[in-house]
Amino acid sequence: MPGRTRKRSPLKIPDRPYIALGLEGSANKLGVGIIRHDTDGSTVVMSNVRHTYITPPGEGFLPRDTAQHHRDWALSVINDALSKAQISLHDIDCICFTQGPGMGAPLSSVALVARTLSLLYDKPLVGVNHCVGHIEMGRQITGAQNPVVLYVSGGNTQVIAYSQQRYRIFGETLDIAVGNCLDRFARVINLSNDPSPGYNIEQEAKKGKRLVPLPYTTKGMDVSLSGILTSAEAYVQDKRYRRNGASATDGDDIITPQDLCFSLQETVFAMLVEITERAMAHIGSKEVLIVGGVGCNERLQEMMGIMAEERGGRVFATDERFCIDNGIMIAQAGLLSFRMGYRTPLTKSSCTQRFRTDEVHVAWRA
């Protein structure tokens, strides 16, 4: 059978350096990134600054308070990013911002900042899909060519593959996202939100010694996570549960918060590995790219790596600089769109909380 020829990218090598400013604020992270595409085809991260809105233990972040945080910190974070990049806004070619999906109030606050800068400095606007930003930055950093993408974050859980200038969704959560599941359980057992609930669950899970039964709910290419969260919460009311760990008088039949964190991670991540493997088999890919905030989890990367190795493949992932929501991913995806001639008119720059990954025309890929 003849080898498959690689299609030529419609994205031409730039005739001059292009610089983009990216603004991200779809949840509790306010990120500003500046990226440059050079004439030799290389990409340079000039700055990537982020500030996180952190709430007390046991509390989530409300849209109104999160939006206020973004408004309070926008000027400071933008100036910090410009200072680290050693440029001014006059040097920017376009201003890119997250247009969705995400929380309505924070999205709108950051979009307002983007519009203001666009008008003040006469720079074109480029609205960016948050999910596509994660994918494009992941591809850029890791060098993955045509991977199955597992996108796991606080608001999204999707298995994605590229085809015909779209990122096609093969499977997704039917209810809550994996990051939301972990964050909500962290609130149940009163874990700190600093630096993030998911990170603290990961650390507690490393101390777990018992795997308790939890619902394993894969439905074809999709997963359901609300039931597993409810079941994990129910163990907190179990008479065997010891909030402060085992004491000298306890027997072997006890359940600790660390056991529940361990069990929740193992079960949920096994479900994600299963549906990712199905997608790999379907499209014949040997690569997996994990993006999104939960993608920082080392246990998820380890489990996915075992599966990929058994298939003769490999896993690509980034560290917390690029996994967790950031401005540089918005700048990267936005600048790719900009170089293909895309602009967002001011009249169409409103945000949407529901903006699916497969709605975006990925014009820069063959």
Image (tube, rainbow, N blue to C red):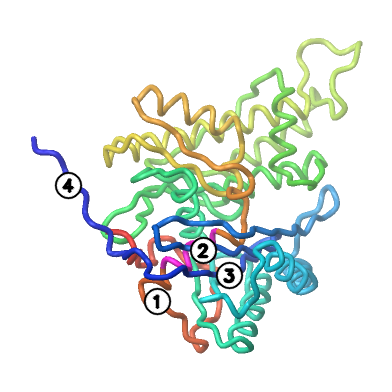
Work out whether mark 1 precedes mark 4 in sequence or the reverse, and give the earlier one: 4
Q: Which residues are magenta?
A: 329-336
- Please tell me which residue lies in front, 186 or 13: 13
Three-letter residue code for mark 3 = Leu
Work out whether mark 2 precedes mark 3 in sequence or the reverse, and give the earlier one: 3
Task: Tell me if 335 is positioned left or right of 295 in this view.
Answer: left
Three-letter residue code for mark 2 = Arg
On the image, numbered disc 4 is attached to which residue?
5
On the image, numbered disc 3 is attached to which residue?
21
- Measured in 3D between alpha carbons, the distance from the residue under mark 3 to the one under mark 4, in whole angstroms, is 35 Å
Three-letter residue code for mark 1 = Tyr
On the image, numbered disc 1 is attached to which residue?
342
The spot of residue 298 in percent (x, y) is: 60, 32
The spot of residue 65 in percent (x, y) is: 79, 68
- Circle 1 or circle 2, nearest the eye: 2
Q: Quadrant of residue 267?
A: top right
